[in-house]
Amino acid sequence: MYCSSTPVVRRCLALGMSVVLALTPIGALRADMGPVRYLDPGRPVASRVDDLLARMSLDDKLGQMTQPERRHIEPDEVTRFRIGSVLSGGGSAPSPNNVRNWADMYDGFQRAALAAPLRVPILYGVDAVHGHNNVVGATIFPHNIGLGAARDPELVRRIGAATAEEMTGTGVDWNFAPCVCVARDDRWGRTYESFGEVPELPSSMTTIIDGLQGSALGRGPTSVLATAKHYVGDGGTAGGRDQGDVRLSEEDLRAVHLPPFREAVRRAVGSVMVSYSSWNGLKMHQNRYLITDVLKGELGFSGFVVSDYNGIDQIDGAPGFTRKEVAAAINAGIDMVMVPAEWRRFIERLRAAVEDGTVPMARIDDANRRILTKKFELGLFERPMADRRYLGTIGGAAHRALARRAVAASQVVLKNDDVLPLDEGDRIFVAGRGADDIGLQSGGWTVTWQGAPGATTPGTTILQGIREAAGGSATVTYARDGTGIDRSYDVAVAVVGEQPYAEYEGDRTDDLRLDDTDRETIGRLRAAGVPVVVVLVSGRPLNVTSELPGWDGFMASWLPGTEGAGVADVLFGDTDPSGRLPVTWPRSAAQEPINAGDGQRPLFPLGAGLGYD
């Protein structure tokens, strides 16, 4: 706990009392209402919520339902408007971006929340989708598509727990993850956020929720709130268009896209984020049937529902949001609204909708009850500040070792003409844009929203991993474009693939072919007459059908993150390849969408992968 050490606080701590209570002028909490029960950690959560709700004004309640972005709100505004949550969008970080500045920033916002009359702490949300990836120096794990290839729910649970520890050190207590979408079209720019194309894969990987939240929310010092997203069907949009339309019958929507959310709810996930996409023309952000009737009613979800970033703006198709859109979203069952910049306008329009009866007060109270319940369960009223004991775990050796094992487990060998595993005594020539580039191998949602090539954060590149695995006496030569290779080398390794990207900007409507630069690099290696192994670093299958016959080895590495040595572990046989395709690999982009059981003949089927036996 990072807090004041005044005598009254020390005495309250010794008595097991809430730090918030110790710092609170009781008069400000409306003493006429009797004892301040909600600040008593010995009382049941439901009783504490009842007591707090009874003390809250409409301003307090509207503030709890509002989530601005850190760049668009000052700490004093958090106090004044009773804001319930703040987020960092992709790449939104303190400057300089380091672990202590993150903790300081979090504590500053939290102190501001605690300065309001009722002393209700905020939740701080980030997209920690493959580790605490907004923070420079954090451990970056493989993206979900790689973890789907690993098919190891316990490994994924441990990754969730490691991510929670690193978040805890910076104070951040709410993770907008996991994405449990079922990606059905590889052209979609968020394919790598999916564990796989069949519902069984994302459903089995919801163990990451257990890792993030712990055995129960708030049980243990590193428990953080998890979010199942994006509800529902975002991986099944027509043409693979991000934020597009899911044109399915209800029967098919339930069979393919709903099961992972059912499993997430079974694991008591704390929040669910609504998708930008539509279902048969109706925006999910206004779909009362799916949010209230199915998710909260049928599935029994007791947490709270959050919108996506400016998601309510899209309900009527026009820029910005109207009072009608605000009312439609809240009445549909959205409890907290991610409204990065125009949060004051949101509060005004929601207040007007409540005052004229368009949004019932019962709906406002239900939303607040859901939000406050999770804050109490997390223990935020007792432990509101960053737990700096965990700063040392961020990018620590134990987490990087875990990530390296995850990388190795995610590698999928798809072709091997007696060239793998590599021999430590080989003369090895390494080429390709992805060989010595942390940013490229980590992909999007790494330090910045779209990600970027280059040395964006500390880690081990694939080239560094190869050199380490080959040993000091081996010959490992590197040329990014493949120039300088000759017949004296025993093998060439080309590390090629996609440049970093994230949602929307990552959509592809082309033929999913390799970049011309990559194809030219591989061509130079082949021209030397030595065996060529292609390592593909990508967020989805690419069209390699015409090139594959000229390759002696082919390994899908997905987006491995900061621990490139895990790729080398498989290349050299220190770890036997165990990864299996989590998606169907098409022969051409013309087959998209292609999925198991649809009657098409793929290049490689779902579940394909070779070992070294």
Image: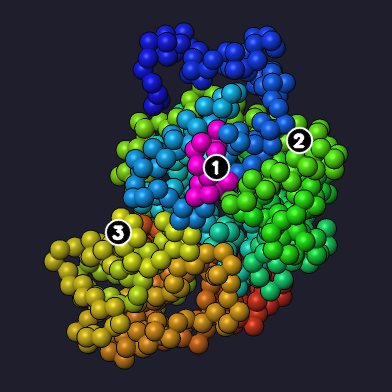
Which residue is labeled 1 in the image?
86
Q: Quadrant of residue 270?
A: top right
Which residue is labeled 3 in the image?
460
> Residue flagged by tag 3: what amino acid is it?
Thr
212 vs 445: above or below: above
Which residue is labeled 2 in the image?
364
**Of the pair 595 and 216, the residue shown nearer to us:** 216
* Secondary element at image label 3: loop
* Residue 348: percent from left, percent from top: 71, 43
> Residue flagged by tag 2: what amino acid is it?
Ile
Q: Which residues are magenta?
A: 68-79
* Mark before the other along the chain sequence, 1 or 3: 1
Q: Main secondary structure of the magenta part?
A: helix
Quarter holding the N terminus is top left
* Mark before the other along the chain sequence, 1 or 2: 1
* Residue 276: percent from left, percent from top: 68, 59
**Of the pair 79 and 518, the residue shown nearer to us:** 79
Disc 1 from disc 2: Cα separation: 19 Å
